[in-house]
């Protein structure tokens, strides 16, 4: 009993430690400057204000509208999620269901790619995109994000595909279902939780990435939301109110995307396993 209480207490403590920075960020976004720089900080704003959000949304510091940055980030995130999910799913099915030469080598390479620091690839990728004439373009940046998301997605989806009993596919074939119908009615619903997990990872990767976007993009009209945050940092001081407001706005789509797809994580566990 005591052990259970200690474990639950530790879990609650970890939860509050993880949530507190997000809470403080959102709380600070509604505080006026006098409360932000007060020597006696308070968890909740005494005099809430929307001035910081108004400054961010109306482009009070950045020269381009907030919605331009939002559109660019949304395009990159959606393209990355869709493309990486499709490519990873096809590769995961091939790796999990078929035996071919260098299969183990391919899996090991997926792990090695995850071990390479992203900062070490900035210059090589910059030269590659320059040679392909894809610098300063959202298409080139999307290719980079997809390249980073696919290896991780393949590795995760491989486990989900391998966990699906082949007997289910064999039973569908006996009932007269072809390979395509078997894939969409049996395998895909059961792998849906893995697709949800990988899509969340891909979305966060594209939505929060800063280094490659800042390095490869030179046109302010193509900047993403993480780059927008730098406009609120200056030599004379940092505009912490707008920074927290922009960070809060930057976090909302990630939470919304997770809430949108998380129900599929549960429904996909059993869908497709029962005939009828």
Image (cartoon, rainbow, N blue to C red):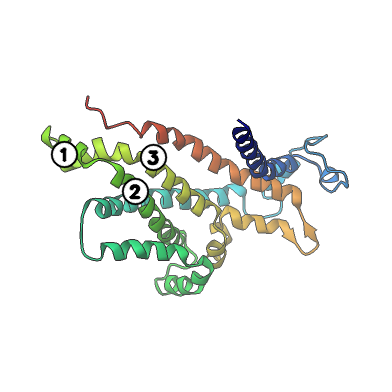
What residue is at 43 percent from the left and 67 percent from the top?
Answer: 134
Mark 1, residue position: 170
What residue is at 67 percent from the left and 50 percent from the top?
Answer: 59
Look at the picture and state if 128 lies above or below 88. Answer: below
Nearest to the eye among marks 2 and 3: give it. Answer: 2
What residue is at 46 percent from the left and 65 percent from the top?
Answer: 115
* Residue 211 position in % (x across, y down): 56, 63
Q: CA distance from mark 1 to mark 3?
A: 22 Å
Q: 42 left or right of 204?
A: right
Query: Which residue sits furthest right?
Result: 39
Residue 82 vs residue 153, the one in the foreground: 153
For the residues labelled 1 and 3, say whether their Cβ atoms are less than 8 Å apart.
no
Residue 61 vs residue 31, the one in the foreground: 31
Look at the picture and state if 226 lies above or below 252. Answer: below
* Residue 40 position in % (x across, y down): 87, 44
Check the picture and name the quadrant holding the N terminus: top right
Residue 150 visible in the current orientation: yes
Residue 58 visible in the current orientation: no
Residue 159's label in the rendered image is: 2
Would you call the spot at circle 3 few (<14 residues within 10 Å), some (14-19), or many (20 or more)? Answer: many
Mark 3, residue position: 193
Q: 176 left or right of 70?
A: left
Disc nearer the start of the sequence (1/3): 1
* Residue 241 position in % (x across, y down): 75, 47
Q: CA distance from mark 2 to mark 3?
A: 11 Å
Look at the picture and state if 205 lies above or below 265. Answer: below
Q: 237 left or right of 184?
A: right
For the residues labelled 1 and 2, say whether their Cβ atoms are less than 8 Å apart.
no
């Amino acid at each position: 009993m005591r052990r259970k209480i200690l474990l639950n207490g530790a879990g609650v403590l970890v939860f509050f430690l993880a949530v507190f920075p997000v809470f403080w960020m959102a709380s600070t976004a509604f505080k006026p400057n006098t409360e932000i720089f007060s020597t006696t900080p308070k968890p909740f704003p005494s005099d809430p204000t929307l001035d910081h959000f108004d400054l961010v949304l109306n482009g009070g510091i950045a020269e381009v509208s907030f919605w331009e940055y939002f559109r660019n980030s949304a395009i990159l995130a959606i393209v990355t999620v869709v493309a990486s999910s499709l490519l990873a799913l096809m590769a995961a099915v091939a790796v999990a269901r078929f035996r071919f030469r260098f299969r183990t080598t391919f899996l090991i390479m997926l792990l090695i790619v995850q071990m390479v620091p992203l900062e070490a690839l900035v210059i090589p990728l910059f030269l590659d995109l320059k040679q392909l004439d894809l610098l300063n373009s959202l298409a080139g940046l999307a290719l980079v994000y997809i390249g980073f998301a696919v290896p991780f997605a393949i590795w995760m989806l491989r486990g989900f595909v391998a966990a699906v009993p082949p007997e289910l596919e064999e039973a569908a074939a006996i009932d007269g279902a072809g390979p395509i119908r078997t894939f969409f009615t049996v395998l895909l619903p059961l792998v849906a939780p893995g697709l949800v997990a990988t899509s969340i990872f891909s979305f966060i990767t594209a939505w929060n990435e800063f280094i490659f976007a800042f390095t490869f993009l030179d046109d302010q009209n193509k900047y993403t939301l993480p780059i927008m945050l730098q406009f609120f940092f200056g030599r004379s001081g940092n505009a912490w109110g707008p920074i927290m407001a922009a960070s809060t706005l930057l976090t909302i789509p990630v939470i919304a995307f997770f809430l949108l797809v998380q129900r599929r994580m549960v429904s996909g566990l059993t869908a497709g396993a029962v005939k009828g």
